[in-house]
Amino acid sequence: MKDFVHILFPDFCCVCDRYGHQVCRGCIPTLPLSKGSESIHIISPLSYRDARVRELLKSLKTRKDIELANTLGEYLYTSSQDLLSELTLTKNLRSSIIIPIPITKDRMHTRGFNQAELLAHAFAESYNRHSQTNNKVLFRSDVLIKTKDTEKQATVESREKRFINIQNSFAIHQQYEDLISGQYIILIDDITTTGATLLAARKTLLDAGAREVLCLAVAH
């Protein structure tokens, strides 16, 4: 099916217009950079104001493009590599767990995949592939769960209402509460605007005993 879709809608790099990929790995660093999130706990390298970035993330969310997820997940790792190296030395990041922002079971059933999970998996693989030690980060998509279907954040108008909308919608799977206790967590999502989703999930993890939670998103 994926090959058939690519025949009907062939991919051209959004930067250099070369055939074969929606964006070439070497072209991603030329996309506009984000001015940063309002929260010091959230890192997001690319600017969502750029139409090409918006189109890439829209495609990731609607097409289940594994290749694009791998490309963006690897870029998310390389763009934050200096920070991660510093944290490895200062906060023992080597024992961290990579966790994606979850979606509810109903939404997973409807969509068939979670784009944040694809990104987080690619991020973890890239991290471990470039690690110069035997200590590997752990990827887990079953620890943090979304407990209720909330209105999509993109459709909620104000910043205040977005925080209210997402409040108390995450939980830790009871079976894995001991797993995250005392651990450093890297929380992954595709897009952050107000930061409400990532910060709500971060609070859930901290309340459950995580030592620290760093939030990463591809774009802001």
Image: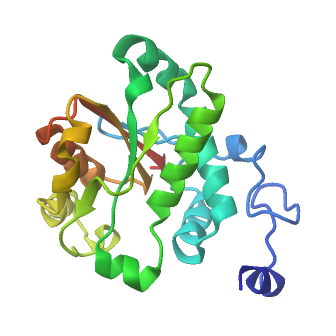
Q: Residue at x 79, y 62 (%)?
A: 21
Q: Tell me: residue 115, above or below residue 62.
A: above
Left or right: 116, with 37 as reference point: right
Name the spot of residue 121 as percent of width and height, x first: 52, 51
Residue 55's image quarter? bottom right
Q: Tell me: residue 3, above or below residue 138.
A: below
Name the spot of residue 13 as percent of width and height, x first: 79, 61
Pick the front one: 162 or 5: 5
Q: Residue at x 39, y 27 (%)?
A: 95
Residue 178's image quarter? top left
Name the spot of residue 155 as percent of width and height, x first: 31, 74
Left or right: 200, with 25 as reference point: left
Left or right: 207, with 62 as reference point: left
Name the spot of residue 162 as percent of width and height, x first: 21, 62
Residue 156's image quarter? bottom left
Left or right: 199, with 137 as reference point: left
